Amino acid sequence: MKRSHFLKNTFLSLGATLVLAACGGTEEATTPSSDAAAGPWVVGTEPAFPPFESQNDSGELIGFDIDLMKAIGEQAGIEIEFESLPFDGLIPALQAGTIEAAISGMTITEERAATVDFSRPYFRAGLAIAVAQDDSETTSLETLEGKRIAVQIGTTGAEQAATIKDAKVSTFDSAPLALQELANGNADAVINDAPATLDAISTGNIPGVKVIGELLTEEFYGIAMPKDSSNREILNAALEEMIANGTYDTIYEKWFGTAPVGTLPETAF
Ligand code: ARG
């Protein structure tokens, strides 16, 4: 393990421990308001998407989404239990009612919004193309025609790849597996959320890979819930409060090292 990795991992697990300790401490002190559903809410996530959700060396869930969801639970007086699921299994689980919510770097799309409800947007992201560092040919979506593209199954990146003429698209269960395919030279490009790809590059997890050009899309992440869930208002009120009182910014800075740029819109479309 490289020193920087070691330090980062140590720092991250330390951060996670502190957050857990903080949760434990306030749990007894906080009396949930009487109108709040006390939970527990089972919250689904696909935990191979750092820095939003991943597992540390002890198998604990860590990441921006995890901290945000825990803080929402504290704010609303609701106990949160995470459940790891495949990304393309999250919406079916919401529809089946086996989970109360899903937080997984999930883009609010009109198609998804037809089957599940979303919280207000909580993160601004977008798709980016990653290619080999020495690739000077691929400069845009158009130049991907006929190329081998790796994506994570069920994602907006997979949808985007499906629109490219003659592309040979291979789908993987996780974004790191798709990126590995590119690093191994078995794919020419990966279409994935920019913050996740940039994190994989900066941590040294996928050597020899770069992100090209501009973002392909602007996307907003939301917390998904079953259609007409009565929890939507509780969730949105907690999110609004955390955006207003600085908790959101603190969590953002912990995982991205900077303050968020600009403000989030109240709706995705
Ligand atoms: N934002 C993209 C989407 O909603 C990718 C999300 C992938 N998240 C994950 N935890 N693997 O389709």
Image: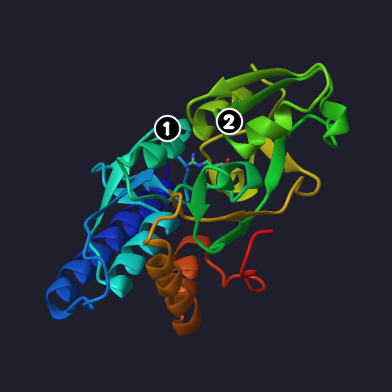
Q: Residue at x 81, y 26 (%)?
A: 144
* Nearest the eye: 189 or 73: 73
| Image location of residue 104, percent across then percent down | 46, 47
Quadrant for ligand 1 reads top right
The correct choice, above or below, for 244 with respect to 211 in the image is below
- Residue farthest front in this picture: 228
Q: Residue at x 62, y 69 (%)?
A: 264
| Image location of residue 40, percent across then percent down | 21, 56
Query: Is 214 displayed left or right of 218 in the figure?
Result: right
Q: Residues within 10 Å of mark 1 (few under 14, many from 20)?
A: some
Amino acid carrying mark 1 in the image: Gly
Q: Please tell me the numbered disc located at residue 89.
A: 1
The correct choice, above or below, for 55 with respect to 31 in the image is above
Which picture quadrant has residue 208?
A: top right
* Nearest the eye: 231 or 220: 231
Residue 73 seen in the figure: yes
The correct choice, above or below, for 145 with respect to 4 in the image is above
Report the mark closest to the observer, 1 or 2.
Answer: 1
| Image location of residue 3, percent across then percent down | 41, 48
Q: Earlier in the sequence, mark 1 or mark 2?
A: 1
Residue 193 seen in the figure: no
* Nearest the eye: 231 or 257: 231
Amino acid carrying mark 2 in the image: Leu
Q: Residue at x 47, y 61 (%)?
A: 255
Query: Is 30 displayed left or right of 100 in the figure?
Result: left
Label 2, on which residue? 179
- Residue farthest bottom in this picture: 245
Which picture quadrant has residue 75?
A: bottom left
Q: Residue at x 45, y 69 (%)?
A: 236
| Image location of residue 32, percent across then percent down | 21, 76
Numbered disc 1: secondary structure:
helix
